[in-house]
Image (cartoon, rainbow, N blue to C red):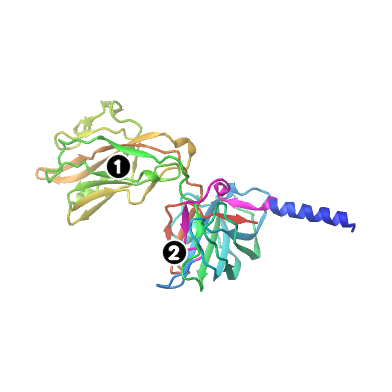
Amino acid sequence: MHRSLVALCSILAAATVTAQAVTLPPEATQWPGNRHNSSVLYASTFGPNEARTQLLYPLTDIPATLTAIQQIDFRSLGTIGNSAATVYLEISISTSPRDPDDPSSTFAVNAPTPAVPVFAGTVSMPAAPFGTWPRPWDVQIPLQTPFALAPAAGDQSLVIDVKTSNSTGLHPWWVEQYGTSPTANGQGSQVLSQPGCLLPNGQTQMQSSHQPNLLHPGGRLALTLGLYPNNQPSAAANVLVIGLQAQGGTIAGQTLPTPLSSFGLPTPPNCLWTVENAMAIPITYNSYSWGGSLTTDQLVPIPNLAGLAGMTFYAQNAALLSYPNGLQFFPSVAMQFTIGDSVTPSGSTITAPSDQNATTGTVSTAGPVSIRLQ
């Protein structure tokens, strides 16, 4: 073959490889990750030196030009220095009907189709000092068995399962992970405090807290209402109502705010309800020696839709409490929330440090780990 033709073929081959390199999440080509993940390339001096991590990415973020995965690359978080080390990895890949933004803590639920083993071996991780972004893809793992991307109808996620063991590092080799984008957090405030509405212990329930950094598309509503009495089993019968209207709105023909007695429910004096009933979400009663609280401890998800940014909604809880004259519905303070315009890239990470054979893990409150597929 003529040398110029050989050169042309080499250029075209290189261009093909470059075109098929896919960075996930796509935001990892636009702004630095602001979280770090320790379980993908795990090390521990305090327990079993192993971990299991499941990485979920939307199949819609992978272009059709990538028909097979032949290599997976990771990069360091620029704000953390990593020392050189080696680690033994076992990697399996599958596609799944699971929503990548709504993962289960059970690994098998996220990947119901048997995963394909694609790599097993020792990987070298170079020293990666502090540096500017974007960081190089220092950890490059050519797969021993390429994974054909041929998802079944209804599949939504690419699932990469990584088992880590036998690291020679003194600490994990931190890889880049994505939390919320560096823009505005959400906001929350009380819009109805009800100082004359008293709990069974005679106190006013005016304590509330939330996490504004989670109030964004793809984030969570993390709300706690405090100062409830302890040892009130009936308080487990409660509902947190979400609505788009509060004062001035209507519900069942009643102008808000209005007493719950307007709806035929027993309620203490001076206690008003002020949120329309658009939907109800889980909230849990917790009892302590000093009192009780109601909390969305499951971190109720906000859909990952950019159009929700700037939307205002309201929340109020009605809990069944025991008063001297019987059970009554106590309406909490009412809250107003505005969703911020920060976003978490689509995708999820589930981790189980110290156990590479774990069947369940912890769903990270951050988003996906940055990877490059080739």
Task: Give the label on residue 240, or none.
Answer: 1
* Circle 2: element type: strand
Task: Give me the residue at 59% from left, 61% from top.
Answer: 138
Q: Residues within 10 Å of mark 2 (few under 14, many from 20)?
A: many
Q: Position of residue 293 (x, y in %)?
A: 24, 49
Q: Nearer the viewer, residue 100 or 250?
A: 100
Q: 193 above or below 157?
A: above
**Magenta-tinted stretch:** 19-41
Position of the C terminus, as image quadrant, is: bottom right
Amino acid type assigned to the residue bearing label 2 in the image = Ala
Q: Residues within 10 Å of mark 1 (few under 14, many from 20)?
A: many
Amino acid type assigned to the residue bearing label 1 in the image = Leu
What is the quadrant of residue 158 in the picture? bottom right
Give how far apart the Cα atoms at labels 2 and 1 are: 31 Å
Q: Nearer the viewer, residue 25 or 94?
A: 25
Q: 369 above or below 300?
A: below
Q: 181 above or below 271?
A: below
- Frontmost of labels 2 and 1 is 2
Q: Verify CB contact (< 8 Å) between mark 2 and mark 1.
A: no
Q: Position of residue 307 (x, y in %)?
A: 48, 35
Task: Give me the residue at 30% from left, 42% from top.
Answer: 240
Q: Position of residue 133 (x, y in %)?
A: 55, 51
**Residue 99 among those drawn in magenta:** no
Left/right of residue 1 with respect to residue 349 in the rendered view: right
**Residue 39 among those drawn in magenta:** yes
List the residue tagged with mark 2.
Answer: 352
